[in-house]
Image (cartoon, rainbow, N blue to C red):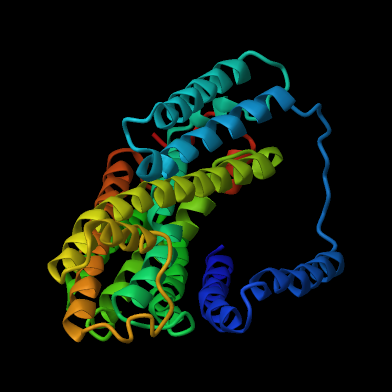
Amino acid sequence: MAIFFGISGGLTAIGPIAGGFLTQWTWRSIFWIHIPVAIIALILTKISCPEDQPQPQPLDYRGTAMITGGMGLVVLGLEQSSVWGWGSVATWACIVIGLVLLAAFVRFELGIKHPLLRLQIFLDRAFAVDTIVLGLMSIVFVPFFFFGSVYSQVALGKNSSQAGEYILWFFVGFVIAAQVGGRMLDRRGARPPVLLGGALGAVGFFLLAGKLSDLSLGAQRLDIAIAGAGLGLMLGPASTDAVNRAPSTSYSEVTGITQTARNFGASLGLAVLGAILITRNDTNVTAALTKHGVPGGIAHRVAASFGGSGPAAGSGQGQSPALLHDVQLAFAHSTQTVFYIMAGVMVATFVAALRWLPRGRVELAEEDAMPLGETALP
């Protein structure tokens, strides 16, 4: 698993870099690139001939509709809160209805013979904590790619291809630490690498946030790598530990649960942190522009545009150096708020693991013989 996450993490770093070059040619190419990748994946899957042990049972369509609708509405409400406003009926309707659907999903799944998700698996405390850890770290993991790339373009003045370097330093730390975390898991279980990763990630994001206003990639490289190392230490051990705690007949289900937790966490992170960035920009960037005589209405529109994507490189040409610097600094302060929150999320991840994640290793042979929902550890 450490090798898997190291390779997948390293290849993930290629995406933003390659995407930067591709979009300079045509933005449509970022969709075309999936075609050869998918063809290669199909060929490799055919060659590998993975074992297939189907366990046929009816699909829970009602549960599927409730959980996808619930998660989708919650994310939509949070995502659009910066546009609709927190006083909007639409914002609260999406969030409340989404939460009601998720609550109904839990109740429904507990009462049917063939549920989409056997919730009894969460009776295993360690598995539940592993899932929480994966969800929390994903609030930071995937959103960092977006916010780091936009910060690099807006505040540092990089173009889309150069912005990939900012993400690359993150994966330098991530890939190396993923191997260390795997070895720690083999020797001592998931608790040590998850705790160390949470602490390291919190320190890395905290230090990085403090240096964003320096407007210098050179001053941030080490902190970016430290933050990446923290997540690298955690991802493989938490995922592997979760799988090891399930009976062999439930591997696919457990993998689905952990992947859903990661994707839902990433979606929430992008929605909430994106809304916060837009709100902070409305204050910081607008103030910077109006300070230089830009009308308030125009300043608000410009500030809002920075919340979704960075302006193209060179878009500041023709503007006074003082104005450009103040706008870059204002956006850096907005991103600073987001990264401090990321540090706080990593602290919460550390606390959850410290409080509830058991010590010691899990042996697969023992787990296979245990009923679902029980744990071999106190």
- Give the side of residue 172 with respect to residue 263, left or right: left
Q: Using the image as rendered, state which of residue 365 and residue 142 is in the foreground.
A: 142
Q: From what the image shows, is residue 80 above or below residue 147?
A: above
Which quadrant would the C terminus be assigned to in this image? top left
Count of number-bearing discs: 0
- Identified at 57% across, 48% down, the residue is 259
Which quadrant would the N terminus be assigned to in this image? bottom right
Q: From what the image shows, is residue 204 above or below residue 173?
A: above
- Give the side of residue 359 with respect to residue 222, left or right: right
Q: Position of residue 249 (x, y in %)?
A: 71, 39
Q: Using the image as rendered, state which of residue 219 and residue 300 is in the foreground.
A: 300
Q: Where, by quadrant of the figure, is residue 148 drawn? A: bottom left
Q: Position of residue 222 (x, y in %)?
A: 27, 79
- Give the side of residue 305 with respect to residue 53, left or right: left
| Residue 337 visible | no
Q: From what the image shows, is residue 207 above or below residue 358?
A: below
Q: Position of residue 327 (x, y in %)?
A: 23, 72
- Identified at 32% across, 67% down, the residue is 227
Q: Using the image as rendered, state which of residue 78 and residue 342 is in the foreground.
A: 78
Q: Position of residue 241 (x, y in %)?
A: 50, 49
Residue at the far top in the pictured view: 111
